[in-house]
Image: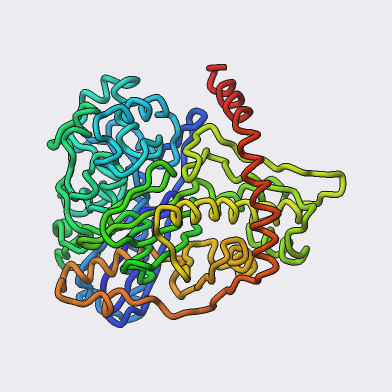
Amino acid sequence: MFIGIDLGTSSVKTVLVDRQGHLRGTASVPLNLSHPQPRWSEQDPEDWWQATVHAMDALLAEAAGKGLTLADIEAIGLSGQQHGATLLGAGDEVLRPAILWNDGRSERECDELEQVGRFREITGNLAMPGFTAPKLMWVRRHEPEIFGKIAKVLLPKDYLRLRLTGVYASDMSDAAGTLWLDVARRQWSEPMLAACGLGIEHMPELFEGSQSTGRLRPELASRWKLGKLPVAGGGGDNAAGAIGVGIVKAGQAMLSLGTSGVYFAVSEGFKACPESAVHSFCHALPDTWHLMSVMLSAASCLDFSARLAGYSDVAALLADAEAAGPVRADSPWFLPYLNGERTPHNDTHARGAFVGLSATTVRADLANATLEGVGLGLLDGVLAVEAAGLGAEVITVIGGGSRSAYWLQMLADILGRPLQQRAGGDVGPALGAARLAWLAVEPEASLDEVCPPPPLLQTFTPRADRSAFYREQRHPVFRRLYRQLEPVFLSVDAASTGKG
């Protein structure tokens, strides 16, 4: 059996998976976000660790209660939210709260990074505030006393690895999201590090996601009644989620409906299309890469609208939207840019908006508009990846948002592609981490054996009339609304940050 630990933005999830691919246990502990200033997003790494300890306690207690033999657990794999800047001093003390993937404060620093020679060629990406490198430039500029104490910079899941094993290590897929990796060569780039005032000595050692990086500390092995298990390199949450649903070969694609929304397509070798704000990253498997579009607010928009419209929870919003029927030609639009946007706009100033409200608008209209708006934002990302030369005939869907059949049918209609809902999609990254743990102890095992697609639950086939409606009537207006409101977003953001 294998353990997968996924450090998400809203919770830490743990899973126990056997060699037949069956889920033998799960546990989850929630996390809180901090927004101390507009466009800031932070978490305390100690909260990550405490949540991980409690989730592991619960997972293993459940396993023991089922009569499972803990001695049969062979390895641990890690997955986590990408890009977070976890700054450690010489004694591994945390120097400040971690700056997260959805933090937008470092726009100025991104402009500076873009001026570094061969920047896009080396990194394969645009400089965006969500990535790690501009965050460190911001700290150097605004918190020089903290910057001067930095001994190591770790990504979120790699901080958990340090606490689990005492080892500084990362994997290629997560490291690719820092803007310090030479993505084609799968190694740290000294020029990119130097541009941020850092060197190789500040970085963890790099491994493939399917390699062992260290072993569980003796005191933790004793606490959990485990051996000194190997801990695999693991992967960033999207790469691990892809492995969890068998997206491991060129031509395969996945849509992740989590806090953010991600379209992930495996590529044949290294490709890049930074001008469209498409991310080019290493996959968590050797000699494999992928392209990815990211919208910063996806399923989180449903939480927002449920709260705004007075629903008891997201399930109530979904039920009301379905009962009211599909989006109409006179339905309001929703722009889902609650935390800015990455693909295709690369705009930290973008904001959410309901447009086209009337005296007859009811909250079910807002619910449907929210579902559609996220879908149209995802369509932007799919089209951007396709423009870079990667298409897919069928898309596998994972994440918490994938539990709604009504929304999945709407998304299939909007994207014009069949969507496959598979078992275990809601724990995809943790499942992928467990699979990488398996490969770490059995590197000769085939991907077909370790990483098959989970059982197919349902396929949502696009309906031609609804697809035409979204593509021809709704999507053009959606795109035009963003362009027309873009200067408004900029002025509002300037006023809120005192720069107007």
Name the residue rendered at 64%, 62% in the picture: 315
Q: Quadrant of residue 207?
A: bottom left
Q: Nearer the viewer, residue 426 or 69?
A: 426
Residue 155: x percent and y percent? 28, 44
Q: Is residue 488 above or below residue 99?
A: above
Q: Is residue 246 above or below residue 159?
A: below
Does residue 90 show up?
no
Residue 443: x percent and y percent? 15, 71
Quarter the C terminus occupies? top right
Name the residue rendered at 26%, 29% in the picture: 116
Residue 280: x percent and y percent? 33, 50
Q: Nearer the viewer, residue 161 or 495?
A: 495
Residue 375: x percent and y percent? 59, 56
Which residue is outermost to the right?
A: 359
Does residue 288 show up?
yes
406 lies left or right of 388: right
Q: Nearer the viewer, residue 264 or 320?
A: 264
Quarter the N terminus occupies? bottom left
